[in-house]
Image: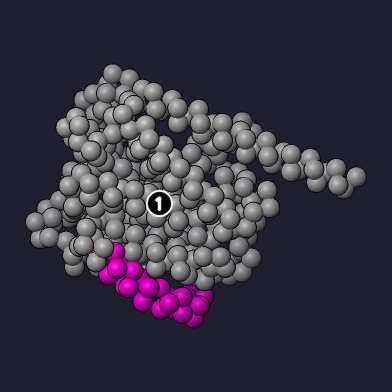
Amino acid sequence: MAVNLIACITSFVIAFSVIPLIIKYSLRKNLLDIPGRRKIHKKVTPSLGGIGIFFGFVVGVFIWMDIAQWHELRFILASAFIMFFVGVRDDLVPFRALHKLAGQIIAVAVLIFSTIHIGSFYGFLGIHQIPLWADYLVTLFVVIVITNAFNLIDGLDGLAGSVGLCSFLAFGIWFYLADNFTFSLISFAMIGGILAFLTFNWEPSKIFMGDTGAMVIGMMLSVLTIKFMGLNYDLPVGHPAKFAGTISTAICFIIVPLCDTLRIIVLRLYKGHSPFTPDKSHIHHAIMRLGMSHSSVTIILSMVNLGYIGLAILFKNFSDNYLVLGIILLSTLLSVMLDQLILRKLSSKAQELK
């Protein structure tokens, strides 16, 4: 664990040193995020904070990894570099949606050369091994979904960084307990970069992570999620780190971006809109309608993420066939309760205006 903590500190120091330089450069070159109709922030703000996170992460990993880990890490890091460059390009000169997706697919294609595969459904609904072609397609789907789901929650000061922090901490501790020090190192190196970024991104933020940060963090979360599922399933019965519900536990670790993405798709289809039409139906937008500040919403959603992680630990001996259904029901209940609170708030305001 000492190496992981040192990697975390190294990443923090590098990111903390780089981000002020990025802010100054962005202000000088007018590389700023301009407030608009679908954006909550009120002032122009630099949006290349993801560069600092990525630099801290990469330096922390390269300095403190064991040379024997290189074989396992090379394709993962190559994929992360591709996602990083796609994100930087999109932050500087926005891509068309299809062009951005193409870049993400290239990153996943490189990733497939590593040990990151979903070759099984781990017994969920009685399904175990799947054909190789299905392995590649499912892996591609999962990485793209998680990467873009995380990108979608990057809408408030501190939110994406805080939620990501919860997930990386859970993965980092679990991989350490499972004796996989390579992926524990990855997790803690990313934690250091995000912590440094949050010191500049907490309300009122001095910089945003942009697509650069959101896509890199989302992709690394997808990598850890897929690796977690394979490693957890292969752990012997009785191992203290083993969860009986492999897929459900992975979902709990990254519940906020996944739940938010599913929620907005359902709401947009219900309203007769395209699922890809931008709007303000995200969970963080909904909570803000209750009168919450950026910081309050960030803390609430971080606690929700930690709460689901706690539930996964509490029910670690239950299988996916029970827990996946339980997660769906609980998430639906919480979403409906949130909508009811908003309706009551709006009704109360209407009564006051009469």
Q: Amino acid at mark 1?
A: Cys
- Nearer to us in this view, 112 or 180: 180
Q: Is residue 240 placed above or below 93 in the rendered structure? A: above
Give the percent coordinates (x, y) of residue 284.
Answer: 57, 49
| Image point (48%, 50%), residue name | 302
Q: Main secondary structure of the magenta part?
A: helix
Q: Is residue 312 placed above or below 41 in the rendered structure? A: above
Q: Residues within 10 Å of mark 1 (few under 14, many from 20)?
A: some
Query: Is residue 32 in view?
Result: no
- Nearer to us in this view, 185 or 313: 313
Residue 188 appears left or right of 159 = left
Q: Magenta span covers which residues? A: 7-32
Q: Is residue 345 magenta?
A: no
Give the percent coordinates (x, y) of residue 56.
Answer: 31, 67
Q: Which residue is mark 1?
A: 166
Q: Is residue 118 placed above or below 102 in the rendered structure? A: above
